[in-house]
């Protein structure tokens, strides 16, 4: 009888999670479809330039892809390049879709939305694989899905939907391989998704390497040496392909291509080289308050800033450490290193661009979901079950911290951000679309 009720409860919990997942997804997709209408993207461009940069994220990509699609495929050597030096599989994809007859900007945007939707499934799967918790997985999913980053990039045709899909596929399948899945198909897709990830932009070279090396250690699993070697080789291969294409289109050949790559590297690092040459004179002043700048960058994209996230995560890890022995500290060491790698290596790029807080999108949802789950478990054990792994004094202290943590620095900006970025814009988009003649 006990096992029967246990099975029924398990089925009910699965149905609830599936229901919440579908509810979140339906709201997100409806919002995104409404946003894809030109009348709404123009509104968003005027209102929140740092989020919904439609000119750069949609119009510019479409224009480049269409120009290439109108010429013979073999008449150009830079199908996979943007601005002559950035890898851009996303432009190539749009070009191929236009060549196939999908010459409509809104349809291309909906294709980007489809990539995000598939990516959400893999995000849920790898978070669940790591946490073994449906609660953490669904909270993480909801946090990310309704963040400014996701809402304002939901129908972009720039790099974001491709990065999101390929990174989530890679992480999920890589963990499966580490846990013993030796099928050739899974291994091939893991390597191929990692390759396509590095063909979209430079931002995921370091996170890819950090994840490949760090996850086996974090999860206390055995390294798959052959797969690890292949993954470590992928960023090198991708950079070589970029260099070859640059050399093919540059009048100066290989030497000019090498110089251009070096200039871009120095420019993104610390504003050195000719490309910087005083263009951003505030750099020396900005570096002294770099953490504050990064805090704002992350807050712009996820409603919560760097300091609040770390406070929540630290408290969640404290509660978890008292309650059980787990791998969570190791997991977050790896994810923090990967998620903030671009920001702490390419300092200049982070200072001058508002959108650079988005590169840790896989870190912050899990940190939020994990921390909220630990707080809920603590409250449940103390209030409902009337038991705790803490002494009475520690319980009072922890309860006080939870109260201030939840209601002041966390839920206030989250609710304010949800109302501003989702609810408010949803009604604006809806009104605009259905008032069309």
Image (cartoon, helix red, strand yellow):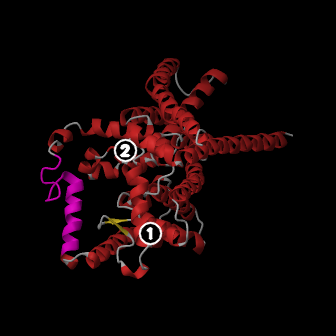
Q: Considering depth in this image, is 163 or 60 the residue closer to the camera? A: 60
The residue located at (43%, 55%) in the rendering is 58
Where are the magenta residues, as a range? 256-280
Marks 1 and 2, the one that precedes in the sequence: 1
258 relative to 308 in the view: left or right: left
For the view shown, which residue lies furthest in the bottom direction?
Answer: 74
The residue that disc 2 covers is 357
Indicate the quadrant where residue 72 lies. bottom left
Position in image of residue 334 (x %, y %): 41, 51
101 relative to 247 in the view: left or right: right
For the view shown, which residue lies furthest in the front direction?
Answer: 437
Residue 198 colored in magenta in the image: no
Position in image of residue 135 (x %, y %): 61, 40
The answer for how far apart the CA atoms under marks 1 and 2 are is 26 Å
Residue 274 colored in magenta in the image: yes
Q: Nearer the viewer, mark 1 or mark 2?
A: 1
Quadrant for the C terminus in the image: top right
Quadrant for the N terminus in the image: top right
The residue that disc 1 covers is 92
Indicate the quadrant where residue 300 lies. top left
């Amino acid at each position: 009888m006990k096992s029967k009720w246990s099975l029924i409860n398990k089925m009910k919990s699965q149905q609830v999670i599936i229901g919440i997942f579908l509810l979140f997804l339906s709201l997100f997709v409806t919002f995104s479809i409404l946003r894809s209408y030109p009348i709404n993207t123009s509104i968003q461009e005027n209102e929140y330039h740092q989020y919904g940069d439609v000119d750069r994220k949609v119009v510019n990509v479409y224009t480049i892809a269409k120009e290439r699609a109108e010429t013979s495929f073999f008449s150009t050597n830079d199908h996979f390049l943007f601005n002559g030096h950035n890898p851009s599989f996303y432009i190539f994809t749009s070009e191929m879709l236009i060549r196939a007859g999908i010459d409509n900007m809104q349809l291309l945007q909906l294709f980007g939305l489809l990539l995000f939707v598939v990516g959400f499934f893999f995000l849920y799967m790898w978070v669940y694989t790591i946490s073994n918790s449906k609660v953490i997985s669904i909270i993480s999913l909801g946090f990310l899905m309704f963040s400014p980053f996701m809402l304002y990039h939901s129908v972009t045709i720039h790099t974001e939907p491709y990065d999101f899909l390929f990174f989530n596929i890679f992480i999920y399948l890589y963990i499966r391989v580490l846990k013993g899945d030796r099928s050739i198909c899974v291994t091939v897709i893991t390597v191929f998704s990692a390759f396509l990830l590095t063909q979209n932009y430079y931002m995921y070279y370091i996170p890819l390497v950090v994840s490949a090396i760090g996850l086996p250690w974090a999860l206390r699993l055995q390294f798959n040496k052959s797969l690890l070697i292949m993954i470590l080789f992928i960023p090198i291969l991708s950079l070589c392909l970029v260099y070859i294409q640059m050399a093919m289109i540059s009048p100066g050949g290989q030497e000019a291509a090498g110089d251009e790559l070096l200039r871009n590297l120095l420019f993104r690092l610390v504003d050195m080289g000719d490309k910087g040459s005083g263009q951003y004179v505030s750099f020396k002043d900005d570096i002294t308050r770099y953490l504050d700048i990064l805090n704002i960058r992350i807050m712009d994209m996820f409603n919560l800033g760097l300091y609040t996230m770390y406070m929540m995560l630290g408290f969640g890890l404290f509660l978890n450490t008292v309650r059980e022995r787990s791998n969570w500290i190791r997991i977050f060491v790896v994810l923090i290193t990967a998620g903030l790698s671009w920001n702490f290596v390419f300092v200049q790029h982070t200072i001058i661009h508002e959108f650079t807080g988005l590169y840790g999108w896989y870190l912050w949802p899990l940190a939020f979901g994990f921390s909220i789950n630990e707080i809920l478990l603590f409250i449940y054990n103390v209030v409902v079950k009337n038991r705790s792994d803490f002494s009475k004094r520690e319980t009072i202290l922890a309860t006080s911290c939870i109260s201030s943590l939840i209601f002041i620095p966390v839920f206030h900006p989250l609710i304010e951000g949800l109302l501003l970025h989702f609810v408010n814009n949803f009604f604006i988009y809806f009104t605009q679309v259905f008032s069309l003649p």
